[in-house]
Image (tube, grey):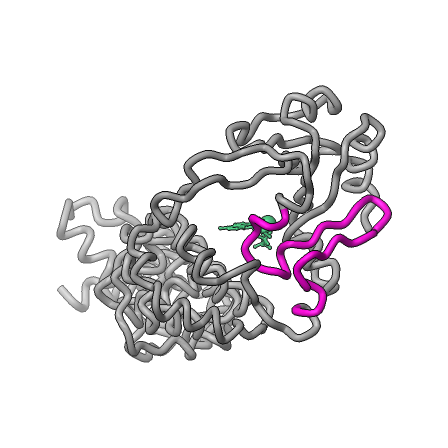
Amino acid sequence: MHTAPKHILQQLNLAGFEAYFVGGCVRDTLLSRPVHDWDITTSATPEEVMQVFPHTVPTGIQHGTVTVVEDGKNYEVTTFRTDGEYLDSRHPQNVQFVRSLREDLSRRDFTINAMAMDSEGNLTDLFGGQEDLRAKIIRPVGDGETRFREDALRMLRAFRFSAQLDFTIEPKAVNAVKKLHPLCKALSVERVRDEVEKTLLAFPKTVAQMADLGLLMVARMEQGRDLSFLHDTPTRKDVRWAGLFYAYPHLSWQDFRLDKRTGQTACETAHLLGQDYDAIAYKGIFAQYGEDVGFCLADLQHKRPMVEEFIRRGDGIYLRDLAVSGADFPHLQGRELGETLNRLLRHVHAHPQDNRKERLYEIYRQNL
Ligand code: ATP
Ligand code: MG
């Protein structure tokens, strides 16, 4: 176990509180997968946590979460809690702090996510999480139907974890999903997007499967589309979203509230994806849409080597690469100038060796 995060547990213990690693970091440690954040659960209240550590940020006080900053790293420390009543399949009505680890673990979604580990590496596994890790099963803590009714996002999370870990969802839980999928319509777009994105990055076909089961109606994703062509593409957000927009063409990046750069790149790439392009056409795409779209398309079409080759050669691609500029055509203005330079750029795309001032001027005069 890593020493820096362990130190956080030990300091809470020294102050007289229980403290454990919990959830994803325990699961991933047991699976020998890289851990990206060390979530900690403790008997200390948020105020008590803030007294123990010099650098804290009250990031989610109403949920009992305080971020502890140590050695420039952030650790989310959350007080043992239950979620109280769920009224609408998405928000717990009131969060209640509790004093026992057991209650905290029992509110968690799946057995593999409901284990805790203390500073000495001792595991608390009350729901058969280790066994399910060995059997590669995603199983809800308690009755799946009840847990999915409380929070419909758990249905999406089941598929997301099955994609990330290559696990099977317990058949009873799949049946519950088949029955309760309409509850997902009430979920916020942002929560759905985050699960879709994680699934897209892990195993894209699962997203189509989720759509087929009616879990993605909130994003208007219909049934019967194929995303398997994404499986041998780089694990990048723009690439994977572009594939999704290609397979579900009536969707736009705004439907998922993606950030503008990823969203625009993905949508523009999706529009270009239906055709094959040679190197000359690719240069035109780089010039017109920019390099984000150019590389994204090249990655989806497995044309990266071809693109890197013309970049490495230093072929003229953009207007700024042309050996002539507006100043070389003082008699032209506005649209006429723009068209002339673009015509010359297209010529250079096909004949990189002609990118010299006299030669371009000659071509310009020939075409007058
Ligand atoms: P990741 O590796 O993607 O971060 P994770 O297991 O850490 O996976 P998070 O979404 O970060 O998942 O949540 C942390 C923990 O909180 C989970 O492991 C689980 O115990 C609990 N949890 C998160 N969301 C829910 C939910 N909707 N219902 C019940 N428990 C949840
Ligand atoms: Mg996490």
Q: Quadrant of the C terminus?
A: bottom left
**Left or right placement of residue 321 versus residue 29 in this view:** left
User: Can residue 352 be seen here?
Assistant: no
Q: Position of residue 46 (x, y in %)?
A: 63, 26
In this view, the residue in front, 194 or 330, is 194
In this view, the residue in front, 281 or 40, is 40
Q: Position of residue 154 (x, y in %)?
A: 46, 57
User: Is 81 placed above or below 36 here?
Assistant: above
Q: Position of residue 365 (x, y in %)?
A: 19, 63
In this view, the residue in front, 35 or 65, is 65
User: Is 212 placed above or below 23 here?
Assistant: below
**Left or right placement of residue 173 versus residue 257 in this view:** right
Region in magenta = 105-132
- Residue drawn at x 68%, y 31% as measured from the top left: 68
Q: Position of residue 188 (x, y in %)?
A: 34, 47
- Residue drawn at x 72%, y 46% as measured from the top left: 21
- Residue drawn at x 41%, y 44% as measured from the top left: 86
Give the quarter of the image for residue 296. Answer: bottom left
